[in-house]
Amino acid sequence: MTRAARAGLVPLAASLLVPAATAQPVFTGDDPLASDTGQASLTWQADGPVEIAITGPKGNTRPLFGGRGETLFLSGLADGDYTVSIAPEHGVVTDELVLEVRHQSLSRALLLTLLGGVVFLTVLAVILRGSRGD
């Protein structure tokens, strides 16, 4: 093997031993997220496995996801402001996302249900009354 060929192998061997620099995982999409149903979809970009954690309104942090992937669907969240963080596996947090959950008012939902019932009964009464006249 010539001296030039050996000199070309040294950088090649070094590049195989040193891992390539990977992009840090980051969330994609809207920030802050807002939900009136307690549900949210998270998306991110990462070159390897990630760890995602959520901090609730009371300050308690819990893990949500660990591994490879690019999307996560959350549901069943109570009212409050949440902070969702992403980090490479066994690494430090590289990005955070704020999630605001504000459910619709129960009194408004009940009022709209009552209004729908009144409209239904009125239509039913008109149909029955019109058929009697024939």
Image (cartoon, rainbow, N blue to C red):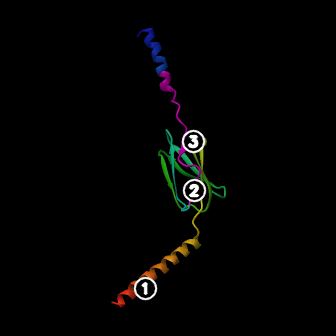
Query: Upstream in the sequence, badge 1 or badge 2?
Result: 2
Q: Which residues are magenta?
A: 13-35
Q: Which residue is mark 3?
A: 90
CA distance for labels 3 and 1 = 66 Å
> Circle 1: is it few (<14), some (14-19), or many (20+) Cα within 10 Å?
few
Query: Upstream in the sequence, badge 2 or badge 3?
Result: 2
> Which of the two marks, 3 or 1, is nearer to us in this view?
1
Q: Which residue is mark 1?
A: 125
Q: Is residue 130 left or right of residue 39?
A: left
Q: Residue furthest top?
A: 2
Residue at x 38%, y 86% (from the top left corner): 130
Q: Residue 65: x percent and y percent? A: 52, 50
Q: Amino acid at mark 2?
A: Ala
Residue at x 59%, y 52% (from the top left corner): 54
Query: Upstream in the sequence, badge 3 or badge 1?
Result: 3
Q: Which mark is residue 34?
A: 2
Q: Amino acid at mark 1?
A: Ala
